[in-house]
Structure formats: C-alpha cells, structure tokens
Amino acid sequence: MPLIPCDIDRLIASADEILALQTNESLQLAKLAQMQAHSIGYIQGEVRAGLIFGKAQLILGELQGALNTLQLTLLMAEDGSLEKAQLLEQIARGHFDLGDSTLAAKLWQECTQIALVQQHFSPLIHAHIGLGQIHFGFENYPAALYSHYQAFEYLHTSSSTELRCQVYANIVLDLLSLERQSEAAAMLQRLQDAALTQRSLSTDIETYRLKGLLDLANQQVSDARSHFATALKICHLQANPWSEAMSLLGLGRCDLADQAWAAALAHLNKALEIACGLQNPHLLCKIHFALSSCYEGLNELHTAKIHLTEYLQFKQLLQPKVS
C-alpha cells in the first residue's frame, strides 16, 4: 500500500507527542517520518519531521548533529512559515549551547522579526527566552529579566503549559541572581501550580532544581540537597544529560557549603564528565569554578588554580564578541 501524507502526519504527531518523555523513541519516529516524506516528495512533512528530529538531537546533547539536521531542513522551509520561525529558534538554541552567543542572538532576533510579522507566537516566546538567557550568561540579570518578562507578556497567546513553565523557570533564575528571593519563591509557586496540569519530566527536574537553588540562597543546605537529589533521580528516567549535570552540580554546591570536600569532588567530577561529552561551555564554566573552590578547600592549590584557569577561559569564551 503506497504511503500518503496523512500516514506520515500521524507518525510526525506521535514523534512530537513523546518528544519530552521518550526522546530516543521520538528521534527514531521523526527520522522514519523524514525518510518517508522525502521518498514521496512530501516537503512540508519532511520539514516538520526534520524539526522534531533536530529537537530530539538537541535534547540528547547531539549538538553538531542537531545543527546539521536543522540547517538542512531550514533550506526546505517556506519563507514566513511557522516551521521557518521554529527552525531558526532551534538553530539559535544549538549555537547558544555551543557557546556562540553572538550568532545565537542574531538568529533569535531574526526569529522574533518573522514571528511578530506572521504572528507565530510560540517561537516568539521561545526566542525571548533565549535572548534572556544570553543576557543571563553575560551576568546582565536585569536585561535577562526584562527579556523573560517580554516572553511572559505573550503567554496568553499559547495554550502550552510546558512553554509557560519554561518562562516561569527562567524568571525564577533571574530573580534568584538578583537576590530577590521572595519574588523568586512566588514565581516558583506559579511554576509548581502550572506543572501540576501536565506530565513532563523535564519540568519536574527543573522545578526541583530551582527549589534547590532557592534553598541554597536561603542557606537551607539540607533541603537543597534533598531537592537536587530528587531532580537527579528524575533525570535517570529520561535521557537529558544537561539536566543530570546541573543536578550533580547542585549537589556539589551543597557539599561545598557543608565543606564535604570528598563528596563535592565526586559529584563535580561526574558532572564534568557529562559536560565534557556535551561540549557545553556554559556547563563547563560553572563546574570548573565549583571544582576550583573544592580543591582550594582540600588545600590542593595547584589543581585549584588549573580549574580556575579553565573557568576564566570559558568565561572569556562566553563574553560578547566585538565585531
């Protein structure tokens, strides 16, 4: 029986539905849909399948593979289409994860321009989240908060609870970095309330991790440790190496606060191993800084200096590039 577009559409819908919870399976379905769409010349289906395939690769930390997939798919996307805006947003995400904030910002800005004109609000919200994360990476927390509140203002256009939770989570991080703990706690409660209405392991992980960060900010180390440990347990239910490394980093920071140097070293080295596999400079920057503090606590000053140097190099890499 010959393939028809509606069969491929069902396959694409299935891949999209399980993307967050069963990423590896979603990737395989999207790849199959992409191949089938190509075989019958169904370009729109090939574009939509390629988008999900690339998203899955990003979640799994396959950054270069994801960029290759998304950029090839972008060539087939119709100008002004929702898929083109979504592809630009995801390509920007890939470059951001690889540390090229300048190119990521340019692509996210391009995405916002298309999305505003065509009223594609979901990629518009995602792009504002990304632009805020760039400001956050440069430690410009007021600008990060402004961008994330821009995303917040468009939430009424979307029915996606997952997207709402992403905006809330980023605002919590901004407020914590600005030492506005009470406001962060209030926004975290909104995140928890929204998360109750959906089934998303990624949101659950981020919620517990943010609880841990809020606890650390309030010097409640025992509670923080419990929340980071819960986040890590949930990480083992899905393939999300970035979240696993961040949860381990959180546990390492709890160990540092308790001056439990050996435990900190175990958690941080495990996080470093994952981060090296991902080649994510944002992660590597944070972990090397924590390792520097750990080795300083162990009075291994030479090793502490090595990690401090690595931290400074990654921090410099992540600074805005002057053209």
Image (cartoon, grey):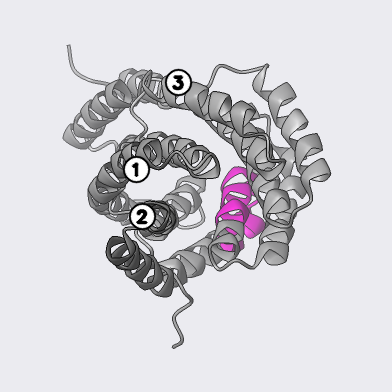
Q: CA distance from mark 2 to mark 1?
A: 8 Å
| Image-quadrant location for residue 156 | top right
* Crowding near the residue tagged with mark 3, few <14, some 14–19, many ≥20 C-alpha atoms within 10 Å: many
Amino acid at pointer 3: Ile
Which residue corresponds to mark 1? 265
Which residue corresponds to mark 3? 234
Q: CA distance from mark 2 to mark 3?
A: 29 Å
User: Which residue is at 45% across, 46% downward?
Assistant: 83
Q: Taking 38 as reference, is 23 left or right? A: right
Is residue 48 visible in the rendered image? The answer is: no
Q: Position of residue 248 (x, y in %)?
A: 41, 36
Q: Position of residue 179 (x, y in %)?
A: 75, 54
Q: Nearer the viewer, residue 164 or 42?
A: 164
Q: Position of residue 100 (x, y in %)?
A: 39, 67
- In what quadrant of the picture does the C terminus appear? bottom left
Above or below for 253 versus 179: above
Q: Position of residue 38 (x, y in %)?
A: 21, 37
Which residue is outermost to the bottom? Answer: 323
Amino acid at pointer 2: Tyr
- CB of mark 2 within 8 Å of CB of mark 1? yes
Is residue 282 visible in the rendered image? The answer is: yes
Which residue corresponds to mark 2? 295
What residue span does the magenta drawing correspond to?
A: 112-130
Amino acid at pointer 1: Leu
- In what quadrant of the picture does the N terminus appear? top left
